[in-house]
Amino acid sequence: MRYRSSLVCLVLVLLAPAFVWAQEETLTLVVKPLVRLTTEKPSWEVEENATVPTGALTLRLVNVLGEGEKKLDINTLRQRAMGQGPLLGELHAMKVVVRGGDVPKSWQQFRLAFPGTIRREGGKRFLLLLVHRSGAWEPMWTAQQLPCDEKCRVVTAIAPPS
């Protein structure tokens, strides 16, 4: 009996980090209207630019890749993101850039997708991503042909309790 309880304790000790790691990390911030990003080209047209929700929001990361998938195009990513909550856009991305030091460190390994903002130039569509470089979050626009892969996560808001 003593052997069994020691074995159970050992298993629990070994698995404890996995349980802690599996907890979802979130970021809570207050979003107010801000100016637009300066990284866009003057020739770009605004196809979509989500400006809601605003106020106190709790953000989380969502992997929208299906099992066995390696990449997604913009259209599929946006369609799957819609099922996870409101599409967040440039307004929300700018707040993440400003509050960069408060963003969970575990998010730094991903490119953060904000599918609520789409720009167009000619026949190309561009999706807003944030990447973590040199200790700061930076905006990056990716063309429709460039996929969202396993290092990409959609940023979505958790609905407040009603």
Image (cartoon, rainbow, N blue to C red):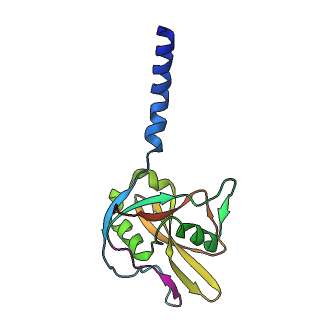
Residue drawn 59% across the image and 87% down it? 121
> Is 130 situated left or right of 58 in this image?
right
Place of residue 133 in the rendered image (x, y in percent of width and height, measured from the top left):
46, 60
Place of residue 130 in the rendered image (x, y in percent of width and height, measured from the top left):
47, 66
Residue drawn 46% across the image and 38% down it? 19
- The quarter in which the C terminus is drawn is bottom left
Q: In the picture, residue 124 is in which quadrant?
A: bottom right
Depth order, front residue of 144/64: 64
Q: Is residue 9 magenta?
A: no
* Residue 70 in the image: above or below residue 9: below
Residue drawn 45% across the image and 26% down it? 13
Depth order, front residue of 160/17: 160
Place of residue 92 in the rendered image (x, y in percent of width and height, measured from the top left):
39, 71
Residue drawn 46% across the image and 79% down it? 39
* Residue 107 in the image: above or below residue 48: above
Q: Across the whole image, how many numbered discs are drawn on residues? A: 0
Q: Magenta span covers which residues?
A: 43-54
Place of residue 68 in the rendered image (x, y in percent of width and height, measured from the top left):
70, 53
- Residue ranking furthest to the right: 68
> Is 146 situated left or right of 32 in this image?
right
